[in-house]
Structure formats: C-alpha cells, structure tokens
Image (cartoon, grey):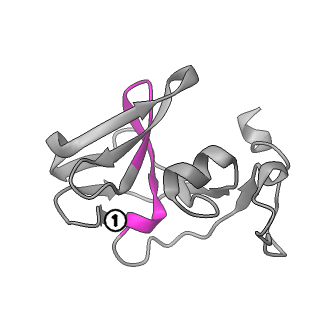
Amino acid sequence: MLITGECFCGEVMYQVDGKLRDARSCHCSRCRKAFSSQASAYALVEPGQFSWVSGEELLTSYVGQHGFGLQFCKVCGSTVSGIYNGHVHGITLGCVNGDPDIELGMHIYVGSKASWEKIPEGIPHYLKGSPADA
C-alpha cells in the first residue's frame, strides 16, 4: 500500500510504502498547542517505509526531552511528522492524502484534556500514555 501526504501549501510531500500502525489521538496540553486543536491525530510508520518526495529542505524541527519531536513546514506551518532521535517515527493523519486505511485505536493523556472537550465512547482511552509505551 502506498500512502502519500503533504503539508497545507503542498511544498513538503512524503510517501509511506506500507501500512500505518498504532493510530492514536493525544489530548495533552503540548499536543493541543502543537496541532492548534483539541488533540493530535497520529500514526506510527515502520522504519524504512517512509521517504520524503519533495520539500525536505523546507522542514524545521522542534525536539523536546528524550529525543522526541515534530517537523513543520517552514512555509505554511503544517505539522507533518513526528521524529525520534532524528528519524521519522510517525505522521500526522491530517496531512495524509486520501484514505490511510487506519482508525484511531486509542485516546491518550485524556487526564489533561481541555475542559471543553468530550472524548468519544467506544475507543480505549488512558489518563496518561499508551500502556504499550510504558
């Protein structure tokens, strides 16, 4: 399966040659700020299946503690991917073109969600991170 994606202005483009995995929505205050939304929508990619098609030179990164960070388009500001120790770890689902054939499997950090947000029923949710990340 080939998945493509791009930023809002279309200058940064990527492809994933394979399936996405472990889609999640994070509701922590940091993701709300980074995504300018009530939460993030993010899925992991297998190492070696992700590649930049164009615009990699237009990316800027923010890396926080423990080597995790986000990459943004310098032109339009879209949050395109997540990185860990300098390598793409996952992609933001809002920048995917078409149907990525994945559903959100969990909501994480709902213990710090915005007071005005309602978490949907029927999807596992955790007050902190995913149990798999522990």
Q: Which of the 4 quarters of the picture holds residue 11?
A: bottom left
Judge from the rendering whether residue 75 lies leftward or rightward of residue 108; answer left or right: left
Image position of 20 with respect to 123: above or below: above
Residue 95 image point, x, y percent: 38, 65
Q: Main secondary structure of the magenta part?
A: strand
**Magenta stretch contains residue 89:** yes
Segment tinted magenta in the rendering: 81-96
Image quarter where the C terminus lies is top right
Query: What crowding class fits label 1: few (fewer than 14 Cα within 10 Å), some (14-19), or many (20 or more)?
Result: some
Judge from the rendering whether residue 26 lies leftward or rightward of residue 110; answer left or right: left
Q: Secondary structure under badge 1?
A: strand
In front of the other: 131 or 61 = 61
Judge from the rendering whether residue 44 lies leftward or rightward of residue 128; answer left or right: left
Q: Residue at x 37, y 27 (%)?
A: 86
**Magenta stretch contains residue 9:** no
Residue 120 image point, x, y percent: 79, 75
Type of amino acid at the residue the image marks with label 1: Ile
Residue 115 image point, x, y percent: 81, 63
Q: Residue at x 61, y 44 (%)?
A: 30
The residue to which callout 1 is attached is 3
